[in-house]
Amino acid sequence: MLTAVTLRAAEPLAQPEPVVAGRVPEACDLRTLTPAMRAAAHWRELSVSFPPRARNQAERETYQQALGYPYPDDQMNRKSFAAALYNGHGLFLLFRLEDSDVQGNKTQDNDWLWVEDVAEVLLANGENPAIPDVEVQVNPAGATFSNRQGAAAVTVPEKITNTLKFQTAVRVQGTLNQAATGDTGWEADVFIPWQSLIEAGILDTAFKPVSGAQAGKLKLCSWDLSSFFLARVNRCLPPANLAIHDRRNFNPLVLE
């Protein structure tokens, strides 16, 4: 019964708007990235969701018939935000995720993190579609997942090709893996050196991190598991459709 609701989200894609990365001092790294720097970033809401939010009572009833329980208002109304910063050393990707039930039980890197709560970025070469995109995920427990995917997606951990050097930091506002305790959300920061993006083919060897430069393309999204209903919601920066690696979904990354 969810099919009709889900198809509503797969509308013609709009022209992707750029993600603008603000500059931070050269000495900045994940340890010295201050709340003020994060607050000053150009935050964007990951406003497209799969499944989409119900728009009226009829769609709420469709969810209830398909899932066997009432429409999960709390989970469906949560919001996810992402932003980018940079300096001469690399790219910072920031996530701020509302969540009243933060779940991150998986603690081993390159496990199936996306079945719980996760912040995710896909990075692609904006000029050469033949170069596979690179996927990086981090969960609230600090576990990470990295994968290179092209036309034939590789999704099983034992076949993963790690192609990026990166660092992450996470902060939970509340408790982790304690569904009976109310949370407010969690934050994740990812730092990727420019050199690593060049070595992965995401950026050309001549790339320079200067104002006005385009640093490839990216897709920003999150996954949100509710352990109360065992429902999972994917949220993305528009435009988006169900084909997560569709390059038409990717936004240009422009350095401010």
Image (cartoon, rainbow, N blue to C red):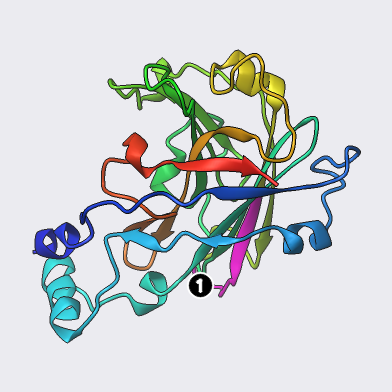
> Does the segment drawn in magenta span residue 184?
yes
Query: In the rendered view, does 176 fall on the left or right side of 61?
Result: right
Q: Residue at left 52%, top 32%? A: 145
Q: Is residue 245 visible?
A: no
Quadrant containing the N terminus is bottom left
Closest to the observer, 186 or 55: 55
Residue at the disc numbered 1 = 180
SS category of the residue bearing label 1: loop
Check the image and report above or below for 24 versus 102: above
Q: Is residue 67 visible?
A: yes
Q: Residue at left 36%, top 35%? A: 247
Q: Residue at left 57%, top 35%? A: 144
Residue 165 position by quadrant: top right
Query: In the rendered view, does 152 fall on the left or right side of 1?
Result: right
Main SS class of the magenta portion in the image = loop
Check the image and report above or below for 218 versus 232: above
Residue 131 x, y percent position in the rendering: 42, 17
Boundaries of the magenta span: 179-188
Residue 182 position by quadrant: bottom right
> Does the segment drawn in magenta span residue 38?
no
Check the image and report above or below for 256 versus 111: below
Residue 150 x, y percent position in the rendering: 35, 22
Q: Hey, what amino acid is under mark 1?
A: Ala
Residue 215 x, y percent position in the rendering: 60, 33
Residue 15 x, y percent position in the rendering: 37, 50
